[in-house]
Image (cartoon, coloured by chain):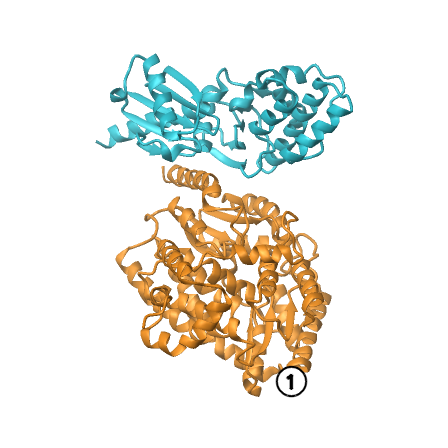
Chain colours: A orange, B cyan
Amino acid sequence: MANYYDALLKLCGFEDDEIKREKSRIDRAFRKLELGPEDMKKAERWVSENHDVELLGVRKLLRAWLMELIDLELAREEGKKIVYYGYPSIPGPGMAIKAAADLAGVDIYCGCPDVVLCHTLGQIFNKLSPVLEAGEQNGLPPGHGLCSLQQIRNGGLAKGIISVPDLVTGSSYYCDMGSKADELLHERYGHRAIYVDGSMDSRWGEYPDYQPERVEFLGAQLNKLFATVSEVLGVEVNTQAWDKSMDTSRALYSALGRLTRLMTADPVPVSYVEAGLALQLTAGSTGRSMTEGPQAVSILCDEVEKRVERGVGVVEKGAPTVLILIAPFSDPSVIRMIENAGLAITTGIYSVPPKKHPPTTYTTLGEIRAEREMRDGYYHSNFGIAKRVEEAVNDLKVDGVLWGYIYNCRPLAETSHTVKKWVEENTGVPVLSLEIDAYDSRNYSAAALRTRVEAFAEMLRDRKASAKA
Amino acid sequence: MIVAGVDIGAATAKAVILDGDELLAFSIIPTGFSVARAAEAVTEDALAKSRLSMGNLEYIISTGYGRRAVRFSNKVLTEIICHAAGVSSVVPQAGTIIDIGGQDSKVIGLDGNGKVRDFVMNDKCAAGTGRFLEVMAGVLGVAISEAGALSLLSREPCSISSTCTVFAESEMVSLRAEGKSREDMLAGIHKAMAHRIAIMGQSVGFRQEVVFAGGVAKNVGMKKALEDEIGLEILVPEEPQIMGALGAAILAKAELVKMHQAS
């Protein structure tokens, strides 16, 4: 007998036998998420309108995200240990924790639940608002400029759609909001929270130099995290685990690198909505991103490569190219609107590969990782971000930058002004500071943003035409 | 070469008819409920003043928030690009445009050739828009057309601290209860709104000549308040409301020339 979710799951790349095999898990997860037949119909429309489901790679990516959601939902009842990390996250520790658990034979769910909910309840079901509202009622009220990503995590716990974890690692090296939200949730639910502190207070102009004290401090915080993991989960995050995590993630990063290169074709061959589905796997998941991700992204790359050969794109050939920060996680219609306005989004700023670094002299895992972050710039300082954007603009020769001015993100809200000024003055490329909320589209719909985006597109087209003449 | 520019704003619909470089006529009507009907009505009105009909129009560009609802337009452009073209045609040395409309406000930086250099726009919150002024004038029982002139009679402008329209309305009610004069309250409102626009426009920068366009540009009190805030003289075109429609018509003519050259 057919299930009420069959049509949607097939649209999202599931095979018949897989649905049959996973039926019990899907039933339980969807019940927990309160997803019924009506939600499936709405989701089919939303996915068809906003995702390029003609591409098998896109369908497989949607499947990977849905499987991640199901794993997240059922983690506790399937007897797993649960570790949540924050976003933005320093890449590596989450994967290393997962690898350490795998090596020790400990069944673990390790991921960023807020990012998973954005890419599933938002991107697939367009049903994130009830979670946000629950978060608002559970201690992070509306109208206070609080981070909506934290409201999602909070709401998920309040509604019981995500489980209380064994350990939470707060990304307070970047922003205090995540750690404060985790503190609130710790007070509510009693789970262990470990704060990975750091300081982005750095002299404007300092990057690429950095103070060794910052590496030592952040490194010590990361080492403290690994020690706490050992204490709470009984697994050791050591060099062996770190190396295993690097081996495991190599295939995904290699496929993502290929996709990033393909996105620079003219015309841009696939929507940034789909590139985002692939790129953000690394931000939200250490599970399905590694087991399903590489194959899904590789299939997508093969299909995209064929489009490049045929000269097929999602915007006109010669359309102005833009670098974006930060693409909305939960609402794909915003990126669609930007592309419909005639802007070719070639890549996200955080996807631009870092420069090669000299060998490190640090010896502990935490310090090695911390030094890498200082060198990469994004967690160094706002000037570090400005310099990286400047380099990316020059390397990729884009026509503009779409800077998501996330009004309720304390670090990024400030960069929207300083980076705009810096990049415009140092590259001559226009930057649109577009006020958005990357996780909550209730106040920032595509319709509300259209005039600014279209005007920016008209401006860039004009500049291109004038430069040609 | 007869072309039209149609600007459908939140409060008013505007149409301009050009024959080459000559402005034949323009029309301004309230937008009302049906955007599509307003577009037809305002264009027909402008055509009637020119003794022409729809059939005479060779190219039409629509702009404004209702631009996509204009079924008879050949091309759609945002009001930002159109304002730049319209204002530059009447003030060629314009460096900055302040446009305050019914539901949004913009500061547009120009490159000296009638093209947009940079822009910033507030369309999320009513503060800093014509609607804010309208609500406040309503609280004070003043016709919106008189609010600006009355504000200039103030001796001691009130300080309005709230940037939210609803809370500013409450603040006005309190000030009224304190016995503050209508003129002082109006001056305070104009100052608060001008301050918001000045802050918003800082990222674009105010370069001379600064031109004030949109319906609110007819308000002499707002012109003065803006001049005080940014410390520069502000020019107001004779018909500030039609700058978007005029720009659309100018760009329509350019499109037509391009098409003729291509054929």
Asked if residue A174 lies left or right of residue A29, the reply is right
Image position of B207 with respect to A58: above or below: above
Residue type at numbered disc 1: Gly
**Which quadrant of the rendered structure holds the N terminus of chain B?**
top left
- Residue drawn at (50%, 20%), measured in percent from left and top? B240
Task: Determine the residue located farthest toward the left in the rendered image.
Answer: B263
Q: Chain of mark 1?
A: A
Q: Is residue A74 left or right of residue A367?
A: left
Q: Is residue A415 above or below residue B139?
A: below
Q: Position of residue A434 (x, y in %)?
A: 53, 45
Label 1 SS? loop
State the image quarter where residue A461 is shown.
top left
Residue A325 lies, in percent from the top left, at 52, 53
Up the image or down, B22 lies above or below A453; here it is: above
Q: In this orientation, does residue B121 appear?
A: yes
Relative depth, front residue between B45 and B6: B45
Please give the residue where the numbered disc 1 appears in the rendered image: A234
Q: Which corner quadrant of the image does residue A58 belong to? A: bottom left
The quarter of the picture where residue B128 lies is top right
Residue B254 appears left or right of B188: left
Q: Where the C terminus of chain B falls, by quadrant?
A: top left
Describe residue A335's horizontal placement relative to residue A219 as left or right. left
Residue situated furthest right in the rendering: B178
Front-lying residue, A440 or A142: A142
- At x 55%, y 63%, the residue is A114
The residue lying at 35 percent from left, 31 percent from top is: B70
Question: Does residue A354 appear anywhere in the picture?
Answer: no
Q: Give coordinates of residue B190: x percent, y percent.
A: 65, 24
Residue A369 image offset from top left, x and y in percent: 62, 71
Q: Residues within 10 Å of mark 1 (few under 14, many from 20)?
A: some
- Who is closer to the viewer here, B258 or B211? B211
